Image (spheres, grey):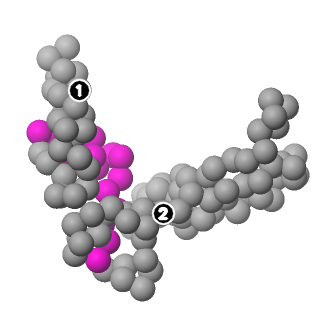
Amino acid sequence: MVAGANFYIVGRDPAGMPHPENGKDLYEPTHGAKVLTMAPGLISLEIVPFRVAAYNKKKKCMEYFDTAHAEDFDFISGTRMRKLAREGQNPPDGFMAPTAWAVLKDYYRSLEKA
């Protein structure tokens, strides 16, 4: 705000934190934005929640999550992406451009050599 920011885009973190016993997310995807809107020092900052996107298994593409069709979606986290890349596996078709995925896989292969 001191630097002139008027907006803050909030993602789903810390919503992705799993419960240690049951593995379910501890927080809802909107909790980060809710907490920031309650912070007393941020009154002049407009909090803009980031819409949740996920992989649509039926359509084989990324799109905004639709709660009415939750069973069609797969949430591929950054952790899961890195694991796939480290293991040399490919994500589902339509998740990411193949050339971009190749860069990611090459990067993780280079870490193994180092």
Q: Which of these two is toward me, 88 or 49?
A: 49
Residue occupying image coordinates x 73% and y 47%: 7
Horizontal and vertical percent for residue 64?
43, 67
The quadrant in which residue 61 appears is bottom left
Q: Is residue 35 above or below residue 111?
A: below
Q: Is residue 66 above or below residue 87?
A: below
Direction from residue 73 to residue 89 in the image, left or right: left
The quadrant in which residue 83 appears is top left
Direction from residue 41 to residue 63 in the image, left or right: left
Q: What mark, if any, has residue 31 been given in the picture?
A: none
Residue occupying image coordinates x 63% and y 50%: 9
Horizontal and vertical percent for residue 108?
21, 29
Going by the numbered disc 1, the residue's amino acid type is Tyr
Going by the numbered disc 2, the residue's amino acid type is Val
Horizontal and vertical percent for residue 17?
48, 55
Magenta residue span:
72-88
Q: Identify the residue under disc 2.
A: 52
Crowding around mark 1 (Cα neighbors within 10 Å: few <14, some 14 to 19, many 20+) is few
Residue occupying image coordinates x 29% and y 77%: 72
Q: Identify the residue under disc 1.
A: 107
**Residue 80 in magenta stretch:** yes
Q: Which of these two is toward me, 96 or 24?
A: 96
Q: Is residue 67 above or below residue 36?
A: below
Quarter of the image containing the C terminus? top left
Crowding around mark 2 (Cα neighbors within 10 Å: few <14, some 14 to 19, many 20+) is some
